[in-house]
Amino acid sequence: MEPEAPLKDTEEAGITHNCGVFGCISSGEWPTHIDVAQIICLGLVALQHRGQESAGIVTSKGEDTKRFSMHKGMGLVSHVFDDHAMMKLKGNLGIGHTRYSTTAESEALNCQPFVVHTQHGALAVAHNGELVNAESLRKKVLDRGVGLSTMSDSELITQALCLNPPEGEHEGPNWPARIKHVMKLSPLSYSLVLMYRDKIYGVRDPYGNRPLCLGKLVPVKKRNHIIQPKLEDDIEGWVISSESSGFLAIGARYLREVEPGEIVELTKHGVKSIGIVERPEDKLPAFCIFEYVYFARPDSIFEGQVVYSVRMQCGRELAKEAPCDADIVSSVPESGTAAAHGYSRQSGIPFAEVLCKNRYVGRTFIQPSTRLRQLGVAKKFGALLDNVYGKKIVLIDDSIVRGNTIGPIIKLLRDAGAKEVHIRVASPPIKYPCYMGINIPTREELIANRLDPPELAEAVGADSLVYLSIGGLISAVTYSIREKDPKKIGHCVACLSGQYPEKLEW
Ligand SMILES: O=P(O)(O)OC[C@H]1O[C@H](OP(=O)(O)OP(=O)(O)O)[C@H](O)[C@@H]1O
Ligand SMILES: NC(=O)CC[C@H](N)C(=O)O
Ligand code: SF4
Ligand SMILES: [Mg+2]
């Protein structure tokens, strides 16, 4: 059967937009022997999946409040940071950013980190998230008679940090108090890294909506290809990052997550927690559940668990909720694969690959024109004929958003001789917009608002189609952390349920 409605007027696939933030500070004697800018650059490469529009790095020697070295530009990290750019970036500490725009245009003006000159010297800020009350905060800042040069909510945060805290300041700037003040003015969503003179601050909003974690840089001694840390006191520095995925690549060891509402301070002497801004009493954390489902790299760690293992558990839950009589379980690579392995283990049906992905075509949504985007899926996959021909297949994908991807893939499999194709989706139907840093299509564009599962199955040419339930997703995500204090566990599922962590301003 030819795929119908979901493929009309298609533009892109998936849910888009996030950002990556990264910071690094060297320990011991300054000037340091480690190449801080290079570490940040590699750290950003490992966060590239979070943002591919622009990238920037700001470094500092840590002795001067007036001067930072900075390089920012449009495009991928490897494109922005050529040898010439890297030469400019000297220093003992620095922060970096890789961006997908949410609140202002994707153009050079809005590249991050933002640098602002305060009454006490230069401050650099990198932000992942989106302020839910940007409008009123914007008004507050503008009412002080200060101008903003962009529409970016990240620049707004930077300027809001220039406001003196209500209790005033006596001996120079009190950054922790300023940060707390801004956190009280805006509850979410942000994970921030800030640099002022010889310090980096890391900040996670009180709901912990966006991820942020800490690592330590250990000396790299290659022996049998294993990175061996020497003694504890040999630590070469500290890093802070949206995800831990890049830590091994830069010789860093995972330390811990920054807690919801926590402010941490990184200096040449170490990392310390300098305060927590609490949520309202009755509120649980609201960590974005789609970090587990789709955004994050599978080797990252959130809440003490590896993302890949959580995705496998989603597949197990799906097998319990939506069993299927089939010859093989397979996946839509990349993000659906871990869940397919979980489904296979739970059901006892063997896993086999049915699609070969062209690794040089990136996530579908980054394609530049409508025509190329429409061709996206076809450009991206080929069918593995021997695994497909005459088979009843359960095909797992992590999510269905606009419904652009799944129809052409089913057609590809049928053309290759598949006997039956049953779709199982390792997350629930997405029905509502996100106001916290993720660009989810409009309600009309979201296929789950137009077609229920049997209608969608028919439209995309599947023999059956079942989504994981919200309860099933939450139990997969909390499966390995169920022993933890229940007050410390909570996930945002607003795009699935319509229940937002805070009352929205509009
Ligand atoms: O319903 P749609 O709007 O078509 O979007 C859903 C698809 O988009 C994402 O894949 P993507 O190709 O972006 O990335 P991936 O390789 O990480 O799976 C997601 O994993 C689904 O496969
Ligand atoms: N996706 C993000 O986290 C974006 C951060 C910020 N709102 C911007 O648009 O630059
Ligand atoms: S609404 Fe959805 S995408 Fe947005 S933060 Fe919540 S779970 Fe994540
Ligand atoms: Mg996919």
Image: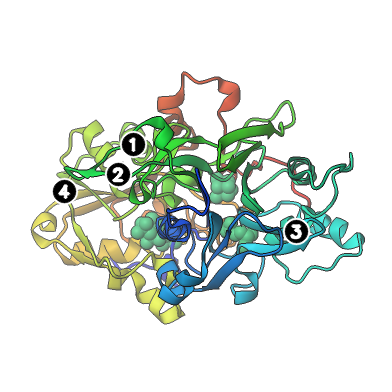
Q: Residue 124: which quarter of the image?
A: bottom right
- Tell me: 162 left or right of 81: right
Task: Say what amino acid the circle numbered 3 marks.
Answer: Gly
Query: How many C-alpha atoms fall within 10 Å of the one at disc 1: few (<14), some, or many (≥20)?
Result: many
Q: Which quadrant does ligand 2 occupy?
A: bottom right
- For label 4, the SS is loop
- Tell me: 237 left or right of 223: right
Task: Say what amino acid the circle numbered 4 marks.
Answer: Ala
Task: Say what amino acid the circle numbered 1 marks.
Answer: Ser
- Tally the numbered discs: 4
Q: Earlier in the sequence, mark 3 or mark 2?
A: 3
Query: How many C-alpha atoms fall within 10 Å of the one at disc 3: few (<14), some, or many (≥20)?
Result: some
Which residue is denoted by mark 1 in the rendering?
309
The vertical placement of 488 against 357, above or below, is above
Q: Earlier in the sequence, mark 4 or mark 2?
A: 2
The circle drawn on residue 121 is 3
Q: Is mark 2 within 8 Å of ligand 1?
A: no
Could you tell me if the residues under marks 3 and 4 are in contact, i.e. CB atoms within 8 Å? Answer: no
The circle drawn on residue 359 is none
The circle drawn on residue 352 is 4
- For label 2, the SS is helix
Q: CA distance from mark 4 to mark 1?
A: 19 Å
Which residue is denoted by mark 2 in the rendering?
338
Q: Residue 254: which quarter of the image?
A: top left
Q: Where is residue 191 drawn, in percent x and y? A: 60, 47
Q: Where is residue 503 drawn, in percent x and y? A: 75, 43
